[in-house]
């Protein structure tokens, strides 16, 4: 485990600024060459950014911290494929990586950094070290990796809550659907139920039969739904992986999720079946067969 | 149409529980459809409403960006703004500089979004209390206008003194010395985040804090006498300076929409599922219900109802079920959308006055149209069954049963 501490508490817009300076970069039109150009400061650029700007390794660029310069000539030394955080996927900004002294020189020569990443010999001590650093109060704030993950994932937590709320509405819709179908089936079964009761089959057996039918319908529906879910999940992953040029998994069906779906289906099936059975059994058998 | 409507209503009233359940189910799926229709363009519509209210017809930004989405600047922003202001039909062109600063008040220090404007009355924010920034070059500089968050969360009041700095620890930096400013106004800064502190000051003062020369701008806001000329002006600006994008409100919304693909695609997927569920529900219920009424249908055919009228009868049943679910769908949809909107707005980086779910006339009409068409489509299969019914065989079977 690593522990990071930030020198600033600037909002996200400022954190992105260092990356955004790369937007000021533009190809000068010179081909990569040896000699003096080889001595230029080297920079690295993500594959996506290089593709966006039409650059290749060895290209010469001019970059600046502000629109009015001063401009620094640099050489694109490396094009790399970064491991993106989920929050970075949709960003379409050009990002440039410089050696720290080069960036500091570009920024005016001040000995400043946005963050320092600290690797501990004993990672379990991360909380203690972070607390000790914060107590020093030297104008920075220290976070453990877990803290940072929590802070950076708040957007995804909101999206997860949104998905859960949508799921609740979907469950409500499917419950009503199931209930409507079972009500119709129940009405269709009325005559048969009346006959079953007249030949001596107990109310419990009749109710059990209706419950079984409802649960069976719910389980069968779940099985089809799960199959459909796998297909949609595969399509989502295929589409978004291609769209964002990443190997991240966007949709995942876990055993726990399958258990939840099956459990919920059984519960809904039993509830719909119980309601239908109650509606069927409250009428006398003779009336059910139309006498 | 009269006898068909009469028969449909009689049929639906004959099975009240079944009809109520179908209408309830369609209301829920209809509510979801309405919400997804609202979501698909909601943020865009909400943004469009706010942008139209601000009164700026064109926004000029560094090429490929959106306002304040990066630290990129228009190199000769002031000059470009002056050239735009000289164009016919342009009421004002306001160059705005933006950056992040640190604000210190006594022992407290907090990061703040800072806007550099040429003078007060620029329309970049709406003054709520106190007075605005003075005109350029006038005495009484060294003043700032703050946003409500800074007043509410940090207790900053009119007349308070703030120290603004480009860096958190000024003593370690060779440039950009901190400066003292007096708070003269409290304003509503459009598109502020829920806890974002914002401050507006004169552009020269902001550039001084940054240790940068004047002339560049993050954004140029253009107010026009007749906003209808916005597209023509945008084309002129783009032709004059290839390093900028001039965006009319529609152009701005189009660019913003390209960054909102998640919501568009999510709403498309879920909207399609809602329509599919509504379709299945109507098809299943009307088909099952039809099976119980085969004798009745055969009787209608026997007394002279044409095949086409029988088909119309069943299709109308699906449409009436959909139509009956509309009030519930809208009521439930609006309640659910408020809750979903509150969830999404609790995300960080969502401006205070934007909404994800916006009920617009096109969204409402699209939902109504989709539900009614789904109702008709849902009735297609049972209608075909009813139309193919053998009259004599069915009636014979009914008599025997």
Image: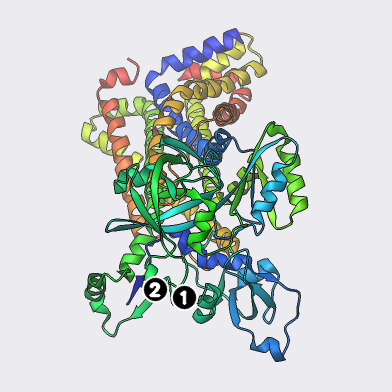
**Residue B300 percent coordinates (x, y):** 58, 12
Where is A105 relative to A283, above or below? below
- Tell me which residue sits at (38%, 77%) in the image: A117
Where is B273 relative to A47, above or below? above
**Residue at the bottom extreme of this rendering:** A35
| Quarter of the C terminus of chain B within the rendering | top left
| Quarter of the N terminus of chain B within the rendering | top right
**Residue B198 percent coordinates (x, y):** 43, 49
Query: Which chain contains the residue that carries disc 1?
Result: A
Where is A88 relative to B336, above or below? below
Label 2 CA crowd tier, 10 Å (few <14, some 14–19, many 20+): few
- Tell me which residue sits at (50%, 72%) in the image: A83
Q: Are the residues tagged 1 and 2 within 8 Å (C-beta)?
A: yes
* Viewer-nearest residue: B53 or B136: B136
* Viewer-nearest residue: B191 or B324: B191
Name the quadrant containing residue A185: top left
**Residue B211 percent coordinates (x, y):** 51, 65
Q: Which residue is mark 1?
A: A110
Name the quadrant containing residue B309: top right
Visible in this render: residue A195? yes
Q: Which residue is mark 2?
A: B172
**Residue A224 percent coordinates (x, y):** 46, 49
* Viewer-nearest residue: B99 or B242: B99
Visible in this render: residue A11? no
């Amino acid at each position: 485990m690593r522990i990071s501490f930030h020198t600033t508490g600037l909002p996200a817009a400022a954190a992105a600024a260092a990356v955004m300076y790369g937007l000021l970069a533009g190809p000068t039109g010179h081909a990569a060459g040896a000699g003096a150009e080889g001595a230029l400061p080297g920079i690295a650029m993500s594959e996506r950014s290089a593709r966006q700007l039409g650059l290749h390794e060895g290209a010469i660029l001019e970059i600046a911290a502000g629109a009015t310069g001063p401009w620094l000539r640099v050489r694109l030394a490396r094009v790399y494929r970064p491991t993106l955080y989920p929050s970075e996927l949709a960003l379409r900004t050009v990002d440039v990586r410089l050696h720290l002294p080069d960036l500091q020189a570009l920024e005016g020569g001040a000995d400043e950094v946005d963050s320092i990443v600290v690797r501990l010999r004993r990672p379990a001590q991360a909380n203690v070290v972070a607390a000790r650093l914060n107590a020093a109060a030297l104008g920075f704030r220290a976070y453990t990796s877990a803290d940072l993950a929590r802070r950076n994932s708040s957007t995804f937590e909101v999206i997860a809550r949104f998905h859960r709320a949508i799921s609740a509405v979907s469950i409500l819709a499917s419950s009503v659907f199931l209930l409507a179908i079972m009500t119709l089936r129940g009405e269709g079964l009325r005559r048969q139920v009346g006959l079953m009761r007249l030949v001596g089959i107990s109310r419990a057996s009749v109710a059990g039969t209706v419950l079984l039918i409802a649960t069976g319908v719910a389980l069968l529906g779940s099985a089809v739904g799960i199959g459909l879910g796998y297909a949609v999940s595969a399509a989502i992953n295929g589409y978004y992986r291609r769209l964002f040029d990443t190997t991240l998994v966007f949709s995942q069906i876990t055993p726990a999720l399958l258990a939840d779906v099956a459990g919920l289906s059984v519960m809904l099936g039993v509830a719909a079946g119980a309601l239908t059975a109650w509606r069927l059994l409250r009428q006398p058998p003779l009336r059910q067969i139309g006498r | 149409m009269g006898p068909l409507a009469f028969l449909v209503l009689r049929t639906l009233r004959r099975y009240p529980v079944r009809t109520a359940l179908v209408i309830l189910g369609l209301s829920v799926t209809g509510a979801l459809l309405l919400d997804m229709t609202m979501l698909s363009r909601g943020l865009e519509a909400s943004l469009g409403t706010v942008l139209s209210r601000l009164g700026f017809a064109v926004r000029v930004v560094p090429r490929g960006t959106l306002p304040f989405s990066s630290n990129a600047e228009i190199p000769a922003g002031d000059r470009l703004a002056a050239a735009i202001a000289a164009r016919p039909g342009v009421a004002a062109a306001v160059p705005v500089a933006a950056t992040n600063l640190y604000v210190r008040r006594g022992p407290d220090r907090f990061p703040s979004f800072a806007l550099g404007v040429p003078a007060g009355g620029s329309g970049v924010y709406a003054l709520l209390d106190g007075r605005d920034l003075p005109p350029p070059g006038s005495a009484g500089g060294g003043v700032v206008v703050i946003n409500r968050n800074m007043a509410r969360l940090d207790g900053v009041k009119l007349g308070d003194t703030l120290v603004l700095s480009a860096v958190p620890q000024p003593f370690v930096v060779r440039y950009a010395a901190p400066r003292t400013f007096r708070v003269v106004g409290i304003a509503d800064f459009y598109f502020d985040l829920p806890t974002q502190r914002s401050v507006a000051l004169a552009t020269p003062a902001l550039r001084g804090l940054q240790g940068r020369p004047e002339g560049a701008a993050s954004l140029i806001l253009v107010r026009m006498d007749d906003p209808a000329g916005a597209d023509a002006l945008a084309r002129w600006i783009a032709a004059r300076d290839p390093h900028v994008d001039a965006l009319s409100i529609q152009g701005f919304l189009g660019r913003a929409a390209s960054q909102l693909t998640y919501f568009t695609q999510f709403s498309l997927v879920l909207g399609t599922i809602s329509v599919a569920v509504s379709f299945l529900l109507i098809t299943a219920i009307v088909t099952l219900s039809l099976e119980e009424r085969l004798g009745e249908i055969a009787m209608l055919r026997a007394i002279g109802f044409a095949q086409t009228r029988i088909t119309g009868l069943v299709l109308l049943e699906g449409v009436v079920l959909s139509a009956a679910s509309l009030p519930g769908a809208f009521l439930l949809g609006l309640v659910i959308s408020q809750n979903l909107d509150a969830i999404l707005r609790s995300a960080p980086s969502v401006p205070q006055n934007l909404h994800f779910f916006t009920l617009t006339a096109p969204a409402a009409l699209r939902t109504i149209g989709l539900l009614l068409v789904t109702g008709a489509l849902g009735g297609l299969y049972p209608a075909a069954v009813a139309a193919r019914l053998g009259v004599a065989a069915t009636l014979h079977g009914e008599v025997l049963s």
